[in-house]
Amino acid sequence: MTQGASRSPGRRTVLGAAVLGTAAIGVGSTTAQADERHGGHGSSYKDLPVPTVIAHRGASGYRPEHTLGSYQLALDMGAHVIEQDLVPTKDGHLVCRHENDITGTTDVAAHPEFASRKATKSVDGVSLTGWFTEDFTLAELKTLRAKERIPGTRQENTLYDGRWAVPTFEEVLRWAEKEGRRRGRPVWLHVETKHPTYFRKLGLGLEEPLARLLRRYGRDRRNSPVFLQSFEPSSMQRMAKLVSSPRVVLFDAADTRPWDFVQAGDPRTVADLVKPSGLQWISSFAQGIGPWVDLIIPKDANGRLTEPTTLVRDAHAKGLILHPYTMRNENSFLPADFRRGSDPNAYGDVFGAYKAYFDTGIDGIFTDNPDTGLLAAADFRG
């Protein structure tokens, strides 16, 4: 998630959210077990609780992102859906990382055997220097260990540095299948193709291997417990031809252009896509949108919320659900209205912020802190 825009939980909070989340998404065990054996068929994204709480890169507020530990904690807290971002290895395996640049999320810099792999690349028009998944085989990548991406903000998370490896998406599918059987209900996933045009030019297209895995694990149907998502609309158009799984187009800031549009010479910006005509086009191949929260409620020059836009109403009029991103508990990530105190890493009035966004009628939201999101959603539902 989080394209270019953009503490440890108390015991009572965690336990309360876990109980609440389990109750909120509980289904009849017999039906759920039968559904899970067939990839969750018989379920539907329209049956998810609203607002839907989507664990952004897992419970990334409490564990290093995109690790099995982060996914497991999110599920244990009761998150309705758990997100994965996918990038490829040199030998074509799909792994879960927010970016192909793994400099800040693994211990690769501490491996002298990979010192020569450090490189400077242009990814979607941005120059980056570091280590990249496409330069490693899966076997090599598995020698690395994951670490906290923003240790200055989330120092407690560094306790878990080195504990988990980088998971493949197939490992996540196996984990979800196992947890689904154990819990008697499907484990919902929200799966993003990262930089698909960039990787296709390298001969590492993401959509075809993703579709093969979805078919292998029975998540390729219209009512499968998975959302597919991308900042590049053409990636979701391609997926629509390969599988029937629900699809979501992600939106960055209004003045930006999807990278596939840049490469194809399409002049449209996100501002064009959020108009009714753009949403109508999106609805021809996707079931939802994932806008940056500022497209829902813009901020003024001081970072305070202003009046909501018409995006929620306009998207719903085209039959699209909305899963905006991203809620986090820390002051530095909150609108200025809801910051408390002067410490940017301290928690602010996140419940107030959730209410402001939920009041707009969104269908769900991505959050680094699923327990907080579940309590906020319960408050909203009354």
Image: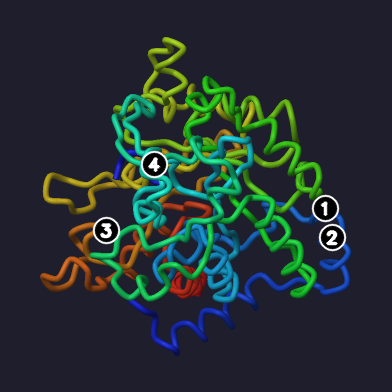
Point 57% across, 47% down: residue: 95
Give residue 74's position: percent from left, percent from top.
Answer: 54, 69
Foreground mark, 4 or 2, reads: 4
- Number of other residues with Cα within 10 Å of mark 2, as a class: few under 14, some 14 to 19, many 20 or more: many
Q: Quadrant of residue 23?
A: bottom right
Point 72% across, 36% down: residue: 211
**Residue under numbered circle 1:** 41
Point 69% across, 58% down: residue: 47
State the CA–CA distance, disc 3 to disc 2: 38 Å
Mark 3 vs mark 2: which is more N-terminal? 2
Q: Residue furthest top?
A: 265
- The numbered disc on residue 101 is none
Q: Amino acid at mark 4?
A: Trp
SS type, badge 2: helix
Foreground mark, 4 or 1, reads: 4
4 and 2 marks in contact (CB < 8 Å):
no
Mark 1 vs mark 2: which is more N-terminal? 2
4 and 1 marks in contact (CB < 8 Å):
no
Q: Amino acid at mark 3?
A: Phe
**Residue under numbered circle 3:** 333
**Residue under numbered circle 4:** 131
- The numbered disc on residue 35 is 2
For the residue pair 241 and 158, the one nearer the viewer reads as 158
249, above or below 40, in the image: above
